[in-house]
Image (tube, rainbow, N blue to C red):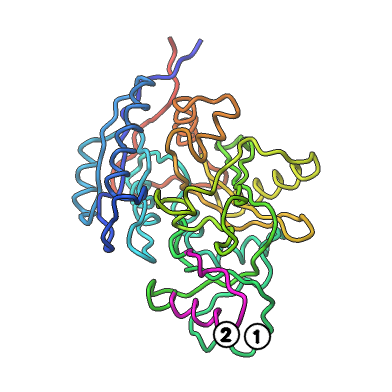
């Protein structure tokens, strides 16, 4: 018989406040993040693990020194960028692995690819997976000229996630609106815009867990039918986080979603292939949408999705009979598995033997 041994877990998160002032109804605020981190720590402790919460703001060198002193068995990665266009998620993950510590979730390159939306779309397209048609990266408003655009289109920042930059004006129906929305992205987010055909069909969030043996969880479907006609059916920032908004109040999620066996096979195939194509590991979420012919397309791969209890990935796990603490343990387990073709070469501290199992 073997049992899981108690681990020392370093739970890391981004303690830097966003540059934009936060509003009380924003569930994506720093205060809400801290509440979540404390609840996550409690759930990990309920598994018998020792948890040290380690905040990282702007002092990466100090973070490295503190992590070295802690010398944890594993780092539970909840570091998320708050600066528009930043890629510190990727750098923090790389630093932790360079220090020789096992890390939950995906590696640095996968995290970076997920943030570069157009690069991710290009990779998925190259792997033969369906993505929204006419996906283009626009760096200047004048680059829009000369193209035979087919509307409606959706415009969003090319290096954001969590609905950042998606608003009621993001779905456009004319060249004038397209030019205006691209200009807003360029000015306000200081990054290129991604333009894609807007797909009119059903939308699914499909979660996946595991390392070498990955498991697709029950599908979640986003329901936009209660939205007023003047609000586009998209998972905007307001729909995700602004508790007092119409989008938040009238957008719901059904899990498990009702789909035909044929559609379920297509959705599962696309989810697994897309997650693997970008190097996803441990846990993640793939967002898909159907076109007018009910064919699924990959909208986005998220290698560091929300882990709050009873929502998102945890909701899908619950539908599969996996409790929240069990889900966290599966994520920890995957951190000790070695991804295929990965070479573990710690560079900042000597490696030491690590394991997850011990005899009773």
Which residue appears at 71% of the width and 60% of the height?
130
Instruction: Look at the picture and state if 21 lies above or below 208.
Output: below
Q: Which residue is denoted by mark 2 in the rendering?
A: 144
Choose between 305 and 23: the one closer to the eye.
23
Q: Residues within 10 Å of mark 2 (few under 14, many from 20)?
A: some
Please say whether residue 176 is one of the residues in the magenta stretch: yes
Q: Which residue is denoted by mark 1 in the rendering?
A: 147
Q: Quadrant of residue 262?
A: top right
- Determine whether the residue tagged by mark 1 lies in a helix, strand or loop: loop
On residue 326, the disc is none
Choose between 232 and 306: the one closer to the eye.
232
Which residue appears at 53% of the width and 64% of the height?
117
Q: Position of residue 4 (x, y in %)?
A: 43, 19
Q: Position of residue 6 (x, y in %)?
A: 35, 21
Q: Residues within 10 Å of mark 1 (few under 14, many from 20)?
A: few
Image: magenta residue range:
166-184
Q: Position of residue 232 (x, y in %)?
A: 57, 62
Tell me: 82 left or right of 1. Answer: left
Which residue appears at 44% of the width and 74% of the height?
185
Choose between 123 and 344: the one closer to the eye.
123
Choose between 115 and 144: the one closer to the eye.
144
Give the Cα distance between marks 2 and 1: 6 Å
Residues under numbered marks 2 and 1 in contact, where contact means CB atoms less than 8 Å apart: yes
Instruction: Look at the picture and state if 349 lies above or below 319.
Output: below
- Determine whether the residue tagged by mark 2 lies in a helix, strand or loop: helix
Please say whether residue 178 is one of the residues in the magenta stretch: yes
Instruction: Look at the picture and state if 319 lies above or below 211.
Output: above
């Amino acid at each position: 018989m073997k049992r899981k041994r108690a681990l020392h877990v370093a739970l890391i998160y981004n303690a830097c406040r966003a540059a934009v002032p936060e509003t009380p109804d924003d569930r994506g605020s720093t205060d809400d993040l801290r509440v979540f981190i404390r609840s996550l720590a409690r759930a990990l402790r309920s598994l018998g693990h020792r948890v040290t919460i380690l905040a990282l703001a702007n002092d990466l060198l100090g973070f490295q020194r503190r992590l070295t002193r802690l010398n944890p068995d594993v780092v539970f990665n909840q570091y998320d960028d708050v600066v528009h266009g930043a890629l510190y998620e990727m750098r923090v993950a790389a630093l932790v692995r360079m220090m020789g510590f096992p890390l939950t979730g995906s590696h640095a390159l996968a995290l970076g690819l997920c943030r570069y939306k157009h690069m991710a779309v290009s990779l998925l397209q190259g792997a033969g997976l369906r993505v929204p048609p006419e996906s283009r990266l626009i760096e200047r408003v004048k680059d829009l000229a000369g193209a035979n655009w087919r509307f409606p289109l959706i415009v969003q920042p090319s290096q954001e996630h969590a609905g950042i930059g998606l608003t009621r004006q993001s779905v456009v129906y004319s060249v004038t609106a397209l030019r205006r929305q691209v200009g807003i992205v360029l000015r306000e987010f200081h990054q290129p815009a991604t333009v894609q055909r807007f797909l009119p069909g059903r939308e699914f969030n499909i979660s996946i867990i595991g390392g070498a043996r990955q498991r697709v969880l029950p599908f979640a479907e986003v329901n936009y039918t209660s939205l007023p006609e003047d609000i586009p059916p998209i998972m905007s920032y307001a729909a995700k986080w602004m508790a007092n908004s119409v989008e938040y109040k009238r957008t719901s999620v059904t899990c498990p979603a009702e789909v035909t066996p044929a559609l379920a096979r297509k959705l599962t195939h696309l989810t697994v292939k897309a997650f693997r194509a970008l190097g996803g590991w441990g846990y993640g979420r793939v967002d898909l949408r159907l076109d007018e012919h009910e064919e699924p397309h990959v909208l986005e791969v998220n290698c560091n999705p929300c882990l709050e209890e009873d929502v998102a990935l945890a909701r899908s796990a619950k539908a599969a009979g996996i409790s929240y603490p069990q889900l966290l343990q599966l994520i920890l387990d995957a951190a000790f598995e070695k991804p295929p073709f990965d070479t573990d070469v710690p560079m900042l501290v000597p490696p030491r033997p690590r394991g997850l199992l011990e005899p009773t």
